[in-house]
Image (cartoon, grey):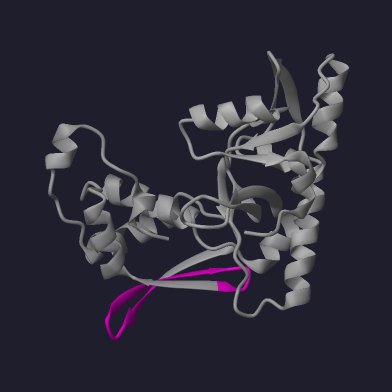
Amino acid sequence: MTGALFGAPAGLFRRLDRSEVRASDIRTAVPRLTATGLDPLLQLDVLDGVRGPVLVLEEAGRSTRVLLGELAVEMTRARVAATPEGVTVALAAWIARRPVPDRLAAAGGMAVLDWTDARQTTLGWRVVLLRAELLVPWRPSRTATLPAVHQIRSQALGRAAGVEGQLRMVGPVGLWTSAQPGLDTAVLVRPEGVLAGMADRGVRLRDPHVVVTPRRPVACADAPVARRLVAEAADASATIPWRELIDLGWA
């Protein structure tokens, strides 16, 4: 969880605004935020530490701690308005992206494709949890055993197979969109459904490839068309031959 989570300011005047967020601003925002109603499993506390006050998040057996001073610095860098409303909204955005407890990942995690590296060159499956309209990645805790990790991933794949969506044809391209935003790539847990849907519409591919843009609709087409789609894509995308989908690992 970094300062980028607070978002970039909009407009010239916001960029010129150098107001500083202080630790005391965040401390005051915590009770305001809890008063609005949080997830019943989530508990927020501010404790006094050796290096300064610490925000502690406890949820389903997972604990996250961060110095209020560090949060204040990141908010200031992100040009968060040093007002009660601005700090509270930024704190809520940070908390929404808190680490996913193992127990919640086991209960509701779903598998989607995501980048496995910072250069965005390789795709792999990742377990995510849907919080409101936000997808938050799950990373195993230090206490998660290998069998537990395997079980959570298997359960996430099973839920992904049940994600509903819609296939529409755009010329020679089949475009799959899930009913829940961001879960489009879940369809590739059972990709044969996309080919079957295209065949029902009279399109049979000789060398099927999928075009994957994480958290965006999935395109399926013959290899030359798929490569052209990737070359023209505005976001980082990758084309994967149909036969290689089964070999994808975990992010």
> Residue 52: within the magenta?
yes
Image location (x, y in percent) of residue 176: 70, 28
Is residue 9 positioned above or below 152 on the image?
above
* Residue plotted at (27% across, 55% down): 75
Image location (x, y in percent) of residue 243: 79, 44
Image location (x, y in percent) of residue 244: 75, 47
> Residue 158: within the magenta?
no
* Residue plotted at (42% across, 51% down): 92
Q: Quadrant of residue 181?
A: top right
Q: Quadrant of residue 101?
A: bottom right
Image location (x, y in percent) of residue 6: 35, 50
Left-right relation of 207 to 35: right
| Residue 123 in view here | yes
Image quadrant holding the C terminus, namely: bottom right
* Residue plotted at (22% across, 48% down): 79
Numbered-mark total = 0
| Residue 183 in view here | no
Secondary structure mostly seen in the magenta stretch: strand
Q: Which residues are magenta?
A: 46-62
* Residue plotted at (70% across, 58% down): 249
Residue sitting nearer the eye, 41 or 145 = 145
Left-right relation of 41 to 68: right
Is residue 81 positioned above or below 208 on the image?
below
Left-right relation of 70 to 129: left
